[in-house]
Every structure is written in C-alpha cells, then in structure tokens.
Image (cartoon, rainbow, N blue to C red):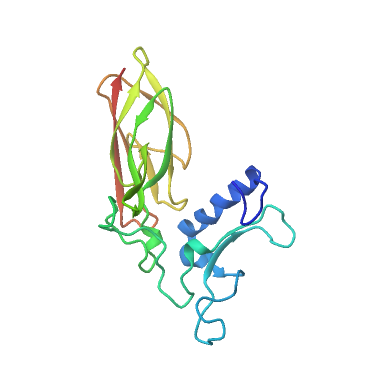
C-alpha cells in the first residue's frame, strides 16, 4: 500500500490510520469530516458558492509522517447531502435495506464488519462493492458480507470447540450477543460445536432501531 503519489509503501501504522479514517466516519458520521486540504474546491475554484469537499483525516499532517486522509472517496461538497454511506441499490447485488445516508443514519449500523475464527473456516459469498465495470462484476469471492446473515462453518472432524471473534462495524453498538450471551467488541469466545450446531450472533445498532441476526451452521469436514 502506498500513500498518495509516494513510491514507497507505508508501514502498518499508516495502514492502521487508513482504516481509522473510515472507522471514524462509521462511528461519528459527517461530524468526522472536515474541508478537504487538497485542491481546495470542487468545480469552479473561483465560484463563491462552491464548497470544499469532505475529508476524513487521522494524525497531524505537519508533524506525523504516518498521518492519513481520505478525500476523493467522500468528495461531495460540504453543502451537499451525505452520500458515501451504504444504501440499498439495484446496480449490483446488495443486501442492505437501510439507507445510512439519512440524518443520523450512521447510528443505524447493526452489522458486523468482520468475524474471525480459530478451528473453523467460513464458507463465504461473493461480495460486491460497485456496479459492473466494462461488463465485469466488481466483486471478491468467498468472503464475509455484512448484509448476508446465514453462513456455513467448515470444522474438521473431531473438533469439539472453536473460537469466534466478531467485530461490529460501529464501535457504538448498543449490544452484541453470541448465543444469547453479551460479548465485547472484538472479543474472542469459545463455543462448543458438533455437526449441525447453529451459532447465533445478534447486533443492535447504536440508536436501537435496527438488529441484525447472523446464523452460522457447523458442518464437520
């Protein structure tokens, strides 16, 4: 991974700051953005009615060599409605039913961003992020999709327990439960398994208006 026009890859601190740029948008919504420092303005730079584009930044650009900012991905003008969060679409396969771009929409994220396993392998799905380009689908195969709620877990024969570490997309969720027991964000838990075991994960959004329920069915292989 390289930063902007640099020809040297950044270290893990830079990568982590890149992730934090997106995470603060999910956690704080548009309050996490500031006017872009790159180019100054969208459209006609001499127009007094054209506003700076949005930017999410981590670190001090003058003092921290690992500072990171994302701007083009959230390039709508500051006077334009928020449009960079998830919303239902027919342009490509997407299971989202909530438009998170509405007022306080970021508080309605009740989905997981990722989930890790020890002793099991998730059978993933195709994950799409945009409409097809040049007739080629924009997708990655066999991955976890936050808006797909039923999965198979392949577990080696003879295994009686696995470790599961779910991470919610928002750090401000109201609650997260694994098989009915509260778990902390990103905490690992041990779960007993057998053929056909169904593991449930329930996540409640920050504002309590949305709940997502995931079902993981164990297959011994």
Where is residue 9? Give x, y as percent: 65, 45
Residue 34 higher or lower than 150, as above or below: below
**Looking at this view, is 155 or 168 the one in front?**
155
**In the image, is 146 to the left or to the right of 49?**
left
Q: Is residue 170 left or right of residue 221?
A: right
Observer able to see residue 204: no
Which residue ends up furthest to the bottom in the rendered image?
A: 48
Image x and y of residue 12, in percent: 63, 42
Classify the position of the C terminus by image quarter. Answer: top left
Compared to residue 210, the image places residue 215 above or below, namely: above
Please count the marks in the image: 0
Q: Which residue is drawn at 42% across and 63% down?
A: 84
Q: Nearer the viewer, residue 69 or 134?
A: 134
Q: Which of 52 and 34 is in front in this view?
A: 52
Determine the image quadrant of residue 191: top left
Seen from this angle, which residue lies furthest top? Answer: 158
- The image shows residue 108 at horizontal and vertical percentages of 36, 58
Q: Position of residue 114 (x, y in %)?
A: 42, 41
208 with respect to 184 (left or right): left
In the displayed structure, 111 sits above or below 80; it is: above
The answer to whether residue 64 shows anywhere in this view is yes
Residue at (37%, 69%) from the top-left corner?
103
Residue drawn where x is 34% and y is 53% of the image: 134
Q: Nearer the viewer, residue 89 or 146?
A: 89
Residue at the image point whose x is 60% and y is 51% from the top: 17
């Amino acid at each position: 991974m390289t930063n902007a026009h640099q020809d040297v890859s950044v270290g893990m601190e830079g990568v982590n700051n890149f992730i934090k740029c997106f995470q603060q948008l999910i956690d704080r919504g548009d309050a996490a953005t500031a006017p872009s420092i790159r180019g100054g303005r969208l459209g006609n730079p001499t127009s007094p009615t054209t506003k700076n584009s949005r930017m999410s930044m981590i670190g001090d650009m003058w003092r921290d060599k690992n500072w990171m900012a994302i701007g083009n991905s959230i390039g709508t003008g500051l006077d334009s409605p928020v449009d960079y969060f998830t919303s239902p679409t027919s342009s490509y396969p997407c299971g989202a039913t909530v438009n998170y771009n509405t007022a306080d929409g970021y508080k309605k994220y009740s989905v997981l961003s990722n989930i890790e396993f020890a002793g099991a392998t998730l059978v993933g799905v195709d994950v799409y992020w945009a409409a097809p380009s040049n007739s080629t689908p924009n997708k990655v195969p066999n991955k976890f999709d936050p808006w797909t709620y039923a999965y198979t877990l392949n577990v080696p024969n003879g295994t009686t327990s696995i470790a599961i570490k779910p991470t919610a997309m928002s750090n401000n969720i109201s609650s997260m439960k694994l098989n009915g027991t509260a778990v902390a964000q990103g905490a690992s838990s041990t779960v007993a398994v057998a053929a056909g075991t169904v593991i449930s994960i329930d996540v409640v959004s920050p504002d309590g208006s949305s709940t997502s329920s995931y079902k993981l069915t164990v297959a011994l292989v």
